[in-house]
Amino acid sequence: MTHLVLLLAVAILLFGRGRIAGLMGDFGKGWREFKRGMSQRPQPQPVLRAVASTQQRAPRAIADLRDERY
């Protein structure tokens, strides 16, 4: 615990109280944005549709590639 207090005192001496407060505020904003982004779930339906349409087109694309080679 004393190491943490000593480290905090050195940081305040080096950077000043204002700069550390600004950094902590920026850290807090970033953390809130991260949590907000993690709580919002993406809609899986468009991804599933894209995969399904790609799977339907894949055999045709492979056949086209074979025709071009020979």
Image (spheres, helix red, strand yellow):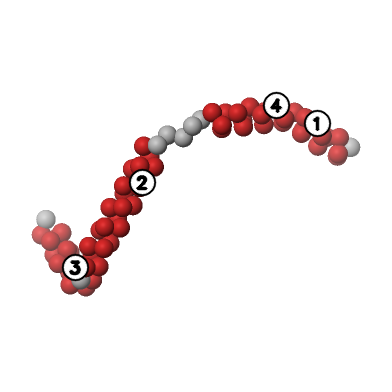
Q: Specify the quadrant of the image occupied by residue 3.
A: bottom left
Counting residues from the start of the chain, the first of labels 1 and 4 encountered is 4
Rendered position, 54 above or below 35: above
Residue 70: give x, y in percent of width and height.
Answer: 89, 37
Separation of residues labelled 4 and 2 (CA atoms): 37 Å
Residue 66: give x, y in percent of width and height.
Answer: 83, 35
The reply to whether discs 1 and 3 touch (Cβ–Cβ < 8 Å) is: no
The reply to whether discs 2 and 1 touch (Cβ–Cβ < 8 Å) is: no
Counting residues from the start of the chain, the first of labels 3 and 2 encountered is 3
Counting residues from the start of the chain, the first of labels 3 and 4 encountered is 3
In this figure, which residue is indicated by the disc labeled 2? 34
Counting residues from the start of the chain, the first of labels 2 and 1 encountered is 2
Q: Which mark is residue 13?
A: none
The reply to whether discs 4 and 2 touch (Cβ–Cβ < 8 Å) is: no
Task: Name the amino acid type tagged 2.
Answer: Phe
In this figure, which residue is indicated by the disc labeled 1? 63
Circle 4 Cα neighbour tier, 10 Å, few/some/many (<14 / 14–19 / ≥20):
few
The reply to whether discs 1 and 4 touch (Cβ–Cβ < 8 Å) is: no
The reply to whether discs 3 and 2 touch (Cβ–Cβ < 8 Å) is: no
Query: Which type of secondary structure does the marked residue at label 2 adopt?
Result: helix
Query: Which type of secondary structure does the marked residue at label 4 adopt?
Result: helix
- Residue, x 19% and y 68% (percent of image)? 17
In this figure, which residue is indicated by the disc labeled 4? 56
Query: Which type of secondary structure does the marked residue at label 1 adopt?
Result: helix
Task: Name the amino acid type tagged 4.
Answer: Gln
- Front residue (pair 52, 6): 52
- Quadrant position of the N terminus in the picture: bottom left
In this figure, which residue is indicated by the disc labeled 3? 17
The reply to whether discs 3 and 4 touch (Cβ–Cβ < 8 Å) is: no
- Front residue (pair 36, 58): 36
- Front residue (pair 52, 22): 22
